[in-house]
Image (cartoon, helix red, strand yellow):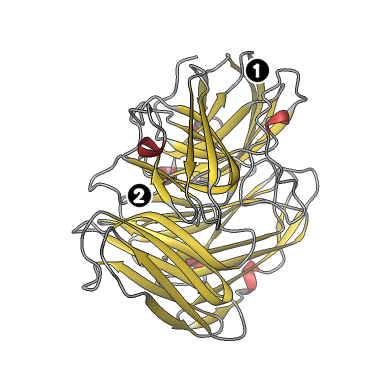
Amino acid sequence: MPRSRVTGVVLALALLATGAAATTLRAPNAVTAATTDFSASAESTALYCTGLGAGATSGRVVFTNLTDSARVLDVTVVSNTGAHATRNVALAAHASTSVSPLGWAPGTLFGVSAVVSGGGVVGAQVAANNTAVAPCSAGGVTDWYAAGFDTLVGSSAVVSLFNPSATPAVVNVTTVTANGFTAPAPFQGLAVGPHAEVAVNLATQIVDTANVGVHVNVLRGALTIVGVQTSASTTSFNVGQGSLSTSAVFPLVTTAAHTRAQVRIANPNDVATSVTVAVALGTYQIAPESVEIPAYASGVVTITPNSAIPAAGFASLTLTSSEPVTSALAVGAVGLALSAPAPLSRTWLIEDFSGRGFSRAALTNVAKESTSVRATDVATSVSFSATLAAGATSDVRALLAGLSKLQGLTLLVTCDRPVRVTTILPLAPVGPVVASALNGG
């Protein structure tokens, strides 16, 4: 089938022997061992996507077959109105196909599941306006944290809950803002039926508020969860985090004029936290930015515009916090797009679905030792190798000698140590939107 025209996405892969694509939205006991086995005889697997809707949040789910053999997908679309539809979708070797859930079933928000007849298939969802991309996951989670949502006039923020199992799920949704903690009654004991989709519209309870942090506690079952933010004409998918953390890294953060870049932090703890963001930008010596965030509150560190940080290309940000928090990068010119911190993985797939490529792509090694990097173009079998220094962030084209462009790319990257991959969508002004990985940035 023809390759669908959608924006690029970076996929962090795990369990490829069974075709399951890993994500940071995994339960605490999920298997995290990575492998590059694309065995055509792998057993059937499933992929789950959520967050596409109607209007500004409409879009499609793209499935890509990385193997030399054809696959058949049993695809089911369910909506928040209870409608559903199921069809078989054929997927040729090394091909992509897309599913637009709005055309399958009536509703305003959708969950999509695909049972795959074999391994080596990955999936990602893309907003119709091409400002957002997020992975499909291989299963549900029991805890989910995310930061940075706006319910201001002109914005909307929805937490999309999809139950991929035959077991009913029950959740509590709580929030923190600059004004403190809330646990709205309609968001407590919320039921998500078997194979059902539920939309939690934050604005119904958290009115006209910036920088809302969210915690979804799944009391029973496990869910696939994505936050959907619409800001002006920009739609973004916040894939969130499975747990709180005292550190986060955001490479390739724009400092371009006429754009905004913020690190948004949510502190759901009962004590205040001190947050410091170190900024690495070329040869400039920049003092770290710091903020004190009260208990049960949210806060912001502004990178651009900031008189202490010059407009000089892409910066690399390292966040540290005295207490575990959740964070997100908010960037854009008019509307702001949210992206969660990229996960660490030894295996990544950098795929350009549209042929438009990326404006930038980089690997970050957070370890204190160097790591070997091996990359293979899945379509051509051309291989590259390099060494990424300890603590370094490197442009993919500069690191992998012989890789000349970031268009038409299906690049499998494996490393001896866990690394982060960050890609920038080719939008104007250059570099305002970070592409989610599977998770992805």
Residue 125, x across and y down, in percent = 50, 38
Nearer to the camera, 26 or 236: 26
- Position of 24 with respect to 127 (left or right) is right
Nearer to the camera, 221 or 202: 221
- What residue does disc 2 label? 433
Q: Residue at x 43, y 28 (%)?
A: 353
Please tell me how crowded label 1 is: few (under 14), some (14-19), or many (20+) other residues with Cα within 10 Å: many
> Which numbered circle lies on residue 182?
none
Instruction: Look at the picture and state if 43 lies above or below 92.
Output: below
**Quadrant of residue 111 within the rendered picture:** top right
- What residue does disc 1 label? 71
Q: Which residue is drawn at 25% across and 68% down?
A: 309
Query: Can residue 107 be seen by looking at this rendering?
Result: no
Please tell me how crowded label 2 is: few (under 14), some (14-19), or many (20+) other residues with Cα within 10 Å: many
Which amino acid is tagged 2? Val
Considering the numbered disc 1 on the image, is that residue within a helix, a strand or a loop? strand
